[in-house]
Image: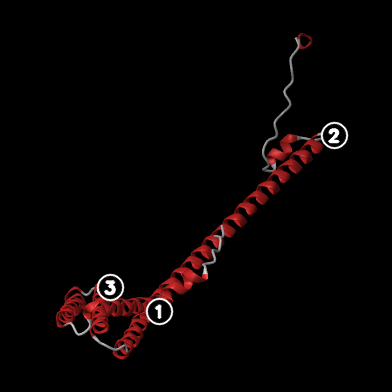
Amino acid sequence: MNEPIVARHWLALAAPKAAPAVATSTVLILGRIWNANGAEHSIGNAALMVVLAAGAATAGTVAAGRLGDSTIAGTAFAASGGLALAGVAGYADGVSLPLLLWALATTVAYGLAARYWRTDRRETVAHERHTVERREEHAHVERVEALRAGAQIEVAREGAAYAQALAAALTARAALPGFDPAQLTQAGLPELPTTRTHTTKEDW
């Protein structure tokens, strides 16, 4: 049975593509809001963001090296970059350096995301190809079984028609004068059943 084709909305298709830019833009905006609320030239706030960014980068290095988990490593490095961007956006007094780091972070984010998008696309294509192959295989098996069943029905019909024709021929032959069933038996044909006679009182 064919599955219904569901068309995805264009927003659902565009959302993953816009996610890296939305994430870095959100960090930049929050960093500038933080800057306007007292983080500008604040050594303590800058030191805090440096420590957090370094901690996230260290966690990513450990996850990539010892654990071998690319998902955790990618998340940790993304968090480290976001914290660094937020720290610079909050500490700097102008927007030139934050915008430069935003552009750099957005480019890196799209570069990393493109790698996962290619992998996901390959897996999706492989799954669709495997599904199509399974459907074609099942359809072929169904066609073969249908042909086999049709051939068996046709053979059964031909056998029944042959049996009816043979019975009609034997019946017609038995009605002819001079028919002797013993000659058929001697020729190798099956013995024909004899007609049962009913005894009456007149035979005694």
Residue 84: % across, % down: 23, 82
Residue furthest out toward the front: 37
Judge whether residue 82 can be spotted in this image: no
- Separation of marks 1 and 3 at Cα, in angstroms: 15 Å
Q: Residues within 10 Å of mark 1 (few under 14, many from 20)?
A: few
Residue bearing the label numbered 3:
71
- Separation of marks 2 and 3 at Cα, in angstroms: 98 Å
Q: Residue at x 70, y 34 (%)?
A: 192
Question: Front-most of 137 and 52?
Answer: 52
Q: Is residue 54 above or below residue 197?
A: below
Residue bearing the label numbered 1:
118
Residue 40: % across, % down: 22, 83
Nearest-to-viewer mark from 2 and 1: 1
- Separation of marks 2 and 1 at Cα, in angstroms: 90 Å
Mark positioned earlier in the residue sequence (1 or 3) = 3
Mark positioned earlier in the residue sequence (2 or 3) = 3
Question: Front-most of 165 and 150?
Answer: 150
Q: Residues within 10 Å of mark 3 (few under 14, many from 20)?
A: few
Residue 26: % across, % down: 34, 76
Residue bearing the label numbered 2:
177
